[in-house]
Amino acid sequence: MLTGQDLAGILAAAGAATQDDLTEFVYWNCYVRDFSEAAHEPAERATQAWRPVLREDLTPLLRAAHAGNPCREFGWRVEQVLEAGRVVARKGGDVRRFEPGHYLNLDSPFSTGKDQRIAICLPKDSTTLQAGYYHIFGEAIGEDDESPRILRFYWNITAEGAPLLVGLITRALGRFQIPYQMKLPHARTAYFRRDAAVVYLNRRYYRVAAMILAGVHREIAAHLADDTPLYTKRLARGLAMAENPGESFGKTRSRMVAQALWKARELGLTGETGLLAALDREFRECGIDPDRPYLNPGSRDEYGWP
């Protein structure tokens, strides 16, 4: 986590007019990259939420490396029809919500109703789901990606190593039919991020997935930078994990840091000891252990690494 000296430096460098400005500064200059890098930059650049100019689209290389297939799964029945063509469907003990275009009605081509049979038809990837990112979907259907049971694995991969990582992940997790999602930046210049590539999967698969991902890590290690994102649990060189908070992990934790600094400054607590105490208090009030900020409230660290 951040030291008292770091917190004092953030307040001095940020020059934030609002708490939202301070959140953006912390996110870009402490989570996305190491604050020590920003602290040694010219003042006019270090006081802003730094973003690079995005150039050179890597999508063709990433797509060519994708070794998976689209997801096709039968045996689902509609439990509830929602608005705009969405449905809630069940298969055995699994219940999921599906968007229109992601399922095929096997009983009627005209309308969808309760108890009708549907086949799930999910794409293998997307270039439009999130601006700036190439998304990959596994061959098996998993949990909704906003579920608190989802784990995030962060890879500090280089642009040169990104296609190789895509190939390794899609082959390894696909071979064992583990449901997952993955995203990487489109642009070569976005790979300055410590969380450049993210793999999402359900915690129920952690033990087997950890062994698989450890094998991937051994093959890709030469293309990983050593550092890992702030707030996460470091697993190995350039690889870390965190539990899913239901929104951007980095933004959520950076908002807590910004709130702590903002409150401390309003109270005149600008010394290192006071800032650290304010940060500790803010995290605990949000239910987060300051020593394990990668965990959700009430969660235990059961994430051993092979």
Image (cartoon, helix red, strand yellow):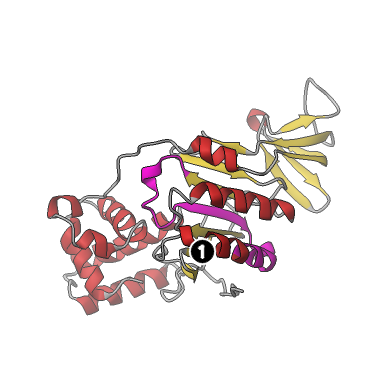
- Residue that lies at the very extreme toward the top in this rendered image: 110
265 left or right, relative to 194: left
Which residue does the image show at 46% across and 39% down from the upper left? Answer: 58
Pinpoint residue 99: horizontal percent, then vertical percent: 65, 35
Which residue does the image show at 67% across and 55% down from the upper left? Answer: 172
Identify the element where label 1 is drawn.
strand
Q: Quadrant of the C terminus?
A: bottom right
245 left or right, relative to 31: right
The region drawn magenta spans 185-213
Pinpoint residue 112: horizontal percent, then vertical percent: 78, 28
The answer, for residue 129, to whether it is visible in the render is no
Mark 1, residue position: 242
Who is closer to the viewer here, 238 or 20?
Answer: 238
Q: Amino acid at mark 1?
A: Ala
Who is closer to the viewer here, 260 or 290?
Answer: 290
Magenta-span inclusion, residue 94: no
Vertical placement of 207 versus 23: above or below? below
Q: Residues within 10 Å of mark 1 (few under 14, many from 20)?
A: many
